[in-house]
Image (cartoon, rainbow, N blue to C red):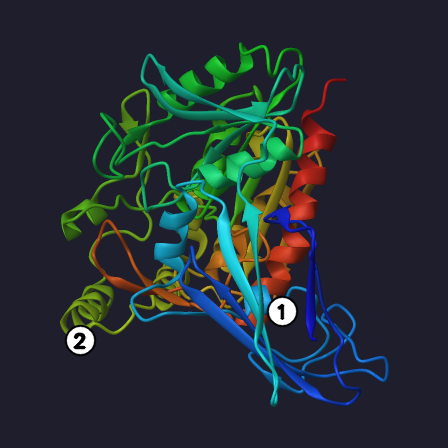
């Protein structure tokens, strides 16, 4: 009788899993179906049994199915979402921090189906989640039970608002960090829109984290995705206590506000000492408004990258008026971008920061990793479905194009996350 093996049966989301099938007729075909119940996604692949009557997904390439080539994670990242689910709904589901439930089913011609259930965890058993309501600061702290002097990391999500990215903080905690998942709008009593958020709020959070025993004598850094990546670069440039910056699919310029009304785009997303930062792209791009209006009317995904490219070309040397002064950062900087980011062209926007660092002979380590054919969601941890490249934005109510191919997005995430963990430990650990 056909047997299935999965090891381990309960693993972290970024942990390697082995999938095997045994007791097959040599040369026979076996159909594998992996159902992700939590995220409502499914992948299929067909394999040919070896001379020993086995299939090892890490060693054997499928002959048909949702991915090609030998890839131990292929069944995870190639999963296709059910109708009504996408990458945006996935992030919302991950924010609940519940273990992801899977069923693997093996089918053979003329044989009985064999199924095996397993899970992937988002929070390790030894991780303590501490809700935070301290002064203005809101969010949740994740750290190993009893840990002290751990690298402190503030985790910032993007323009989706809320505290949706706390699963990233939980993952960093599993890797030895004390990570504060910090919402900055659309959460509890925080501002409802991404408009003129004071940097002093982030500074208050940083001081709170530095005072925690979990961090102790270690240093504090910032990790942000998308608009959170822009904020991370801005915080590094503004506060000398920031010892490391991880900016994923970021912008090297200060961008527009985001709200339920297009008027938000005429206002800045950030302030310091009550003064708004310059707004890029400058308000009044009629073609961008026309494109957005067409997307609203038709439901087609809005591709924002061309508008940013037009604005960059129009600004020319004047882009310096909007640029974040990243060269003032007193710590290491790591940026990552997808070269096919259709939302806002993060590679070009990150290069603005990169050029400033080169031009200033920046004396701290910095790196910008570009991922060819990858889109906006290279910022996700590995082993999640990478097939959705569009989604409906929760704040503006518009379907957005994120870009990238499933394979490129998955490969980028798998390469990126170990680098992030290594970077944070190298630059934030107790000296």
Q: Quadrant of residue 39?
A: bottom left
Which of 65 and 231 lies nearest the eye of the viewer? 65
Which of 113 and 333 lies nearest the eye of the viewer? 113
The residue drawn where x is 42% and y is 55% is 38
Residue 227 in picture, x, y percent from top left:
40, 45
Q: How many marks?
A: 2
Residue on which disc 2 sits:
298
Q: CA distance from mark 1 to mark 2?
A: 34 Å
Q: Is residue 361 visible?
A: no
The residue drawn where x is 14% and y is 72% is 297
SS for callout 2:
helix
Residue 310 in picture, x, y percent from top left:
36, 66
The residue drawn where x is 71% and y is 23% is 429
Q: Nearer the viewer, mark 1 or mark 2?
A: 1
Left or right, 17 with reference to 102: right
Q: Is residue 90 visible?
A: yes
Tell me: residue 109, above or below residue 119: below
Residue 358 in picture, x, y percent from top left:
65, 45
Residue on which disc 1 sits:
74
Proximity of marks 1 and 2: CB atoms separated by less than 8 Å = no
Residue 272 in picture, x, y percent from top left:
34, 25
Left or right, 305 with reference to 178: left
Tell me: residue 72, above or below residue 46: above
Mark before the other along the chain sequence, 1 or 2: 1
Which of 49 and 182 lies nearest the eye of the viewer? 49
Pointer 1: residues within 10 angstroms few (<14), some, or many (20+)?
A: many
């Amino acid at each position: 009788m056909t047997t299935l093996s999965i090891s381990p049966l309960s693993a972290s989301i970024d942990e390697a899993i082995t999938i095997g099938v045994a007791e097959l007729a040599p040369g026979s075909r076996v159909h594998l179906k992996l159902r992700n119940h939590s995220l409502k996604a499914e992948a299929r692949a067909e394999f040919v049994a070896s001379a020993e009557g086995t299939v090892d997904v890490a060693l054997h390439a499928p002959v048909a199915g949702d991915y090609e080539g030998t890839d131990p994670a292929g069944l995870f990242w190639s999963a296709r979402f059910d109708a009504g689910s996408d990458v945006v709904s996935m992030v919302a589901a991950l924010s609940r921090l519940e273990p992801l439930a899977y069923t693997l089913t093996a089918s053979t011609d003329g044989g009985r189906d064999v199924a095996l259930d397993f899970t992937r965890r988002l929070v390790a058993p030894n991780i303590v989640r501490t809700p935070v309501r301290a002064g203005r600061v809101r969010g949740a702290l994740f750290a190993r039970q009893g840990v002290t002097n751990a690298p402190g990391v503030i985790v910032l999500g993007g323009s989706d608002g809320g505290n949706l990215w706390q699963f990233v903080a939980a993952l960093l905690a599993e890797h030895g960090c004390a990570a504060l998942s910090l919402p900055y709008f659309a959460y509890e009593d925080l501002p409802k829109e991404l408009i003129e958020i004071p940097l002093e709020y982030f500074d208050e959070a940083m001081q709170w984290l530095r005072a925690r025993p979990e961090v102790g004598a270690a240093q504090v850094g910032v990790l942000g995705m998308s608009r959170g990546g822009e904020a991370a670069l801005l915080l590094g440039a503004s506060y000398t206590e920031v010892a490391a910056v991880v900016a994923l699919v970021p912008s090297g310029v200060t961008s527009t506000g985001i709200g339920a009304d297009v008027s938000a785009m005429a206002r800045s997303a950030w302030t310091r000492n009550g003064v708004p930062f310059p707004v890029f792209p400058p308000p009044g791009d009629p073609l961008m408004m026309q494109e957005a209006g067409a997307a609203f009317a038709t439901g087609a995904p809005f591709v924002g990258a061309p508008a940013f490219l037009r604005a960059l070309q129009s600004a020319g040397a004047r882009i310096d008026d909007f640029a974040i002064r990243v060269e003032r950062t007193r710590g290491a900087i790591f940026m990552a971008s997808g070269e096919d980011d259709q939302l806002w062209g993060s590679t070009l926007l990150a290069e603005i920061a990169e050029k400033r660092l080169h031009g200033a002979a920046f004396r701290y380590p910095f790196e910008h990793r570009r991922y060819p054919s990858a889109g906006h969601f290279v910022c996700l941890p590995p082993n999640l479905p990478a097939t959705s490249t569009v989604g409906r934005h929760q704040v503006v109510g518009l379907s957005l194009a994120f870009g990238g191919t499933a394979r490129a997005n998955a490969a980028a995430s798998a390469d990126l996350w170990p680098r992030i963990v290594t970077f944070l430990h190298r630059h934030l650990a107790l000296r």
